[in-house]
Image (cartoon, rainbow, N blue to C red):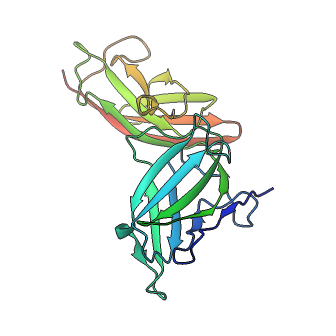
Amino acid sequence: MAIRHTVVSESAALESPTLVAPKNIGDAAYKNVQSIRPTFEWKHHKGDATEYKLEIDKEDTFNTVAHQTFNKSANTGSPDKTDATLYYFNYAIHEFDPGLDRDTYYWKVTALSTNEAATSEVWSFTISPELSLSGITNYPNPFNPNRERTKIRYRLSTDASEIKIRIYDVTGSLVTELDGTTAGEASSIWGKYNDVEWDGRNGRGDIVMNGIYPFEVMARLGDRSVSGRGKIAVLK
């Protein structure tokens, strides 16, 4: 059931912000959030508001160890196309900040002025990404297999049941197949990627010749499969 709490300002001069996204659990348009670093959006007839305080927590009491607070200046909003007094605001958790867990969260926004505060309803959402694959690269590139290995790097939105990495030559013939690691992106900034090393050898154990070697990363979870491609340059 959707949970909505409203804190009403004692003064009518500063109205409460209206939440926009992520949608509230129970709303007809609700969908699970796909990113552990979501973007929060609200709208407000800001009046004398100078700042907004966004709060996120795993409980609607907003007093657990998971409680986070972010501030947003009231000067950063975008005006509505039909109502010049209505502004839209958003806050995105930064790429280099810790993400959220795959769990249910509650959030609210408080408008602040010099003398007043007005708080929105409390909405909830669940982070449950479908399997996706991104950030495919390798380094060093080019690499010399006589001296080093190259790391094939990729990012998973959630844990996969299987990862296969297939490396080909320019004719499309399979050079070798590697088993990849299956960990989904962690909330820590140090746990974003999976790295799998290739020593530059084919399936027979021989070091390959100089050239370009296309590779494909394939991820599977249940009946869902995703894939992505890159190119490795070997230069000895």
Kindly indicate the quadrant of the structure image that contains residue 97.
Answer: top left
**Image side of residue 222 versus residue 99, left or right:** right
Viewer can see residue 224: yes
Where is residue 68 shown, x and y percent of the image?
51, 43
Q: Is residue 55 placed above or below 169 in the rendered structure?
A: below
Where is residue 55 shown, x and y percent of the image?
54, 51
Q: Is residue 186 placed above or below 10 in the rendered structure?
A: above
- The residue positioned 40% from the left and 71% from the top of the image is 77
Number of marks in the rendered image: 0
Viewer can see residue 170: no
Front-most of 115 and 140? 115
Front-most of 212 and 129? 129
- The residue positioned 52% from the left and 71% from the top of the image is 43
- The residue positioned 45% from the left and 57% from the top of the image is 91
The quadrant of the image that shows the N terminus is: bottom right
**Image side of residue 165 versus residue 105, left or right:** left
Front-most of 101 and 221? 101
Where is residue 82 shown, x and y percent of the image?
48, 89
**Image side of residue 135 versus residue 223, left or right:** left
- The residue positioned 29% from the left and 29% from the top of the image is 139
Front-most of 202 and 111? 111
Direction bottom: furthest residue: 82
Where is residue 15 shown, x and y percent of the image?
55, 74
Direction right: furthest residue: 1
Kindly indicate the quadrant of the structure image that contains residue 159.
Answer: top right
Kindly indicate the quadrant of the structure image that contains residue 64.
Answer: top right
Direction left: furthest residue: 236
Q: Is residue 154 placed above or below 236 in the rendered structure?
A: below
The quadrant of the image that shows the C terminus is: top left
